[in-house]
Amino acid sequence: MPELTITQDPIDTHGALSVLHAATDELTQRYGGTGDSEHLHLEELRPPLGLFLVARLDTHLAGGVGLRAIGQPSDRWAEIKRLWVRVDLRRSGIAARLMDEVTARAKELGYVRLYLETGPRQPEAIAFYEKFGWLPLIDYPEGVFVHPHSLRFTRTL
């Protein structure tokens, strides 16, 4: 049985960038345009306020997820960015493991609330977030870019 590992990789390494680009490519295929790519800066996914996790099945890339600080520093809020799992590995529990790990790391960094957005052309993502206790909301923190047609979720840590 292949072993799943999840590591925090610097965002400018090949594995992390491969996952980030695959996630962005899938969003482009589903929605067209550039989405929020111009509003997501790699330095936001770096410590000490952000991070990027890479999942590997044995040594093969399986998925990943990013975390970045949002709002005022005193708010201690963060946003989940680019949760993505390889198509052939979806529904295998990797996304849940990634979300558990990124949530645990967010707590370690002192964040108290998480946010994320997804789109109407991602019904599997919407169902996933609802299943794991993410609560829908209308308003996002002021000053944070959100796509006008996105569905937004939050979770208190």
Image (cartoon, grey):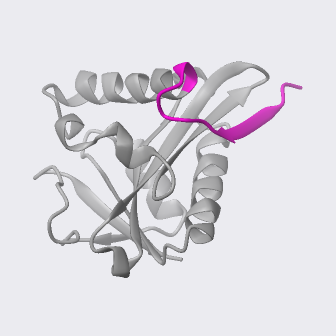
In reply to whether residue 95 is colored magenta, the answer given is no
Report the residue at 63% width, 22% height from top: 61
Magenta residues span 1-15
44 or 133, nearer to the observer:
44
Q: Is residue 84 left or right of residue 69?
A: right
129 or 60, nearer to the observer:
60
Q: Is residue 104 left or right of residue 140?
A: right
Residue 134 placement (x, y as % from top left): 45, 67
Report the residue at 22% width, 71% height from top: 141
In reply to whether residue 3 is colored magenta, the answer given is yes
Report the residue at 42% width, 29% height from top: 20
Residue 137 placement (x, y as % from top left): 27, 72
Q: Residue furthest front?
A: 48
Residue 146 placement (x, y as % from top left): 18, 54
Q: Is residue 18 above or below residue 127?
A: above
* Quadrant into which the N terminus falls: top right
* Quadrant into which the C terminus falls: bottom right
Q: Is residue 68 above or below residue 93?
A: below
- Number of marks in the image? 0
Report the residue at 84% width, 30% height from top: 3
Q: Is residue 152 left or right of residue 53?
A: left
85 or 75, nearer to the observer:
75
Q: Is residue 130 above or below residue 27?
A: below
Tell me where residue 110 sits by quadrant. Answer: bottom right
Q: Residue furthest right?
A: 1
